[in-house]
Image (spheres, rainbow, N blue to C red):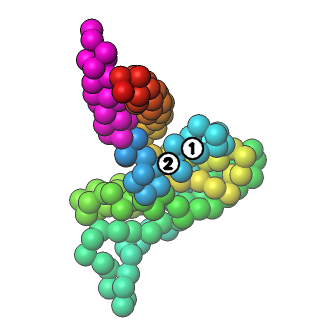
Amino acid sequence: MSESGSVKGALIGAVVALVLAVGLLAPLTFEGRFEALAGWVFGPTWEERTARVSEIDCVREAGECTDDGRFTLTYRYQFEGQEYESERIAPDWLLEGFDEQWHRERQEQFADAKLHSRPVQVHINSADPDQAMLFRPAGLPAMAIAAVVGGLLLLLSVGLFLRGRKALKQLR
């Protein structure tokens, strides 16, 4: 390969690697995704346990249920012999991603669990059992892999760019 072909190949490789890196890393910039990933990698251990729904209601505005199906609930759970109570369904950014049908189906599911005194699954922060939620973000292992591969591609693009720049200076 000629010197100019080497420069051109390095620069094209740098652009391709950069585009792929940005494509893999961009989803982490969406609200809450990076924090969820960092929490999964570096955060506490979340243990799955059972809980009982004690209260459930629709989200109300001016005394009326909202049209979007959102709901509130309170559930009780035990952890290491102590009883706790929580209202957290999921991280806010995750809940905002669900549509009206999802909210209505979950509301029916939890209302049925309360009515028939059926247990529901809850995720409890083992380091701080006051923190619990019914739904944790899914796909975090895939996000971690994408972050690692995207980071490596970003480093590769910088390396190829520097190589191409060095070769370009030598041609002059």
The residue lying at 31 percent from left, 33 percent from top is 15
What range of the chain is rendered magenta? Answer: 1-23
Work out which quarter of the rendered image holds the N terminus and state it: top left
Frontmost residue, 55 versus 94: 94
Residue 166 included in the magenta stretch of the image: no
Q: Is residue 120 left or right of residue 103?
A: right
- x%, y% of residue 103? 32, 61
The answer to whether mark 2 and mark 1 are in CB contact below 8 A is yes
Residue 156 location (% of width, % of height): 43, 26
Amino acid type, callout 1: Ala
The percent coordinates of residue 22 (x first, y second) are 36, 40
Nearer the observer, 45 or 164: 164
Q: Can the viewer see residue 62?
A: yes
**Distance CA(mark 2)–CA(mark 1):** 6 Å
Dot 2 alpha-carbon crowd within 10 angstroms: few under 14, some 14 to 19, many 20 or more:
some
> Relative to 14, is 56 above or below?
below
Residue at the outermost top position = 1
> Can see residue 120?
no
Looking at the rendered structure, the secondary structure element under dot 1 is helix
Does dot 2 land on a helix, a strand or a loop?
helix
User: On the rendered structure, is 167 left or right of 136?
Assistant: left
User: Residue at 41% across / 28% down in the picture?
Assistant: 169
From the viewer's side, name the closer residue of 102 and 41: 41
Quick one: which residue is furthest to the bottom in this view? 62
Q: Which residue is mark 2?
A: 34
Which residue is rendered at x = 41% and y = 22% of the image? 170
Q: Which mark is residue 38?
A: 1
Mark 2: amino acid: Phe
Report the magenta stretch's main SS: helix
In this rendering, the answer to whether 144 lies above or below 171 is: below
Q: Is residue 71 above or below residue 18?
A: below
Q: In terms of depth relative to the viewer, which is nearer, 119 or 158?
A: 158
